[in-house]
Image: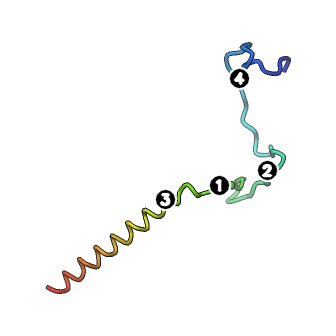
Amino acid sequence: MKHPDPIGEGLAMEAGGGAAGPECIVPGQQAPLRLLGLKVWPLDIEMKFLEPFGRELHSMKKFMDKSCSVMDSSMSNK
């Protein structure tokens, strides 16, 4: 490339990029795993943002279990 930043300097309107092939490994990245014949890169994702949803689902499960037990006990009393 002749200019270090053609888009930032206003010399171009868009940039084109090609997809990296499966053999392209970024330095510091883990090597891909082969699963069912496909190369899959392991992802390190922090799931802390899902904790509130998990707590809410847990409380909904408790509520549903209690309501089912109340319905079952009322049906068995008949």
Secondary structure under the numbered disc 1 in the rendered image = loop
Residue occupied by mark 2: 29
Q: Nearer the viewer, mark 3 or mark 2?
A: 3
Q: Mark 4: which secondary structure?
A: loop
- The mark lying in front, picked from 4 and 1, is 1
Looking at the rendered structure, the kind of residue marked 4 is Ala
Please tell me whether residue 13 is drawn above or below residue 69 in the rendered image.
Answer: above
User: Toward the viewer: 56 or 37?
Assistant: 56
Tell me where residue 52 appears, x and y as whole percent.
Answer: 49, 59
Which of pointers 2 and 4 lies earlier in the amino acid sequence? 4
Q: Quadrant of the N terminus?
A: top right
The image's mark for residue 45 is 1
Closer-to-camera residue (1/51): 51
How far across and down, in percent of the image, does residue 44 sit? 69, 55
Q: Which disc number belongs to residue 15?
A: 4
Q: Secondary structure at mark 2?
A: loop
Q: Where residue 73 appears, x then y in whole percent?
A: 23, 83
The quadrant where residue 10 appears: top right
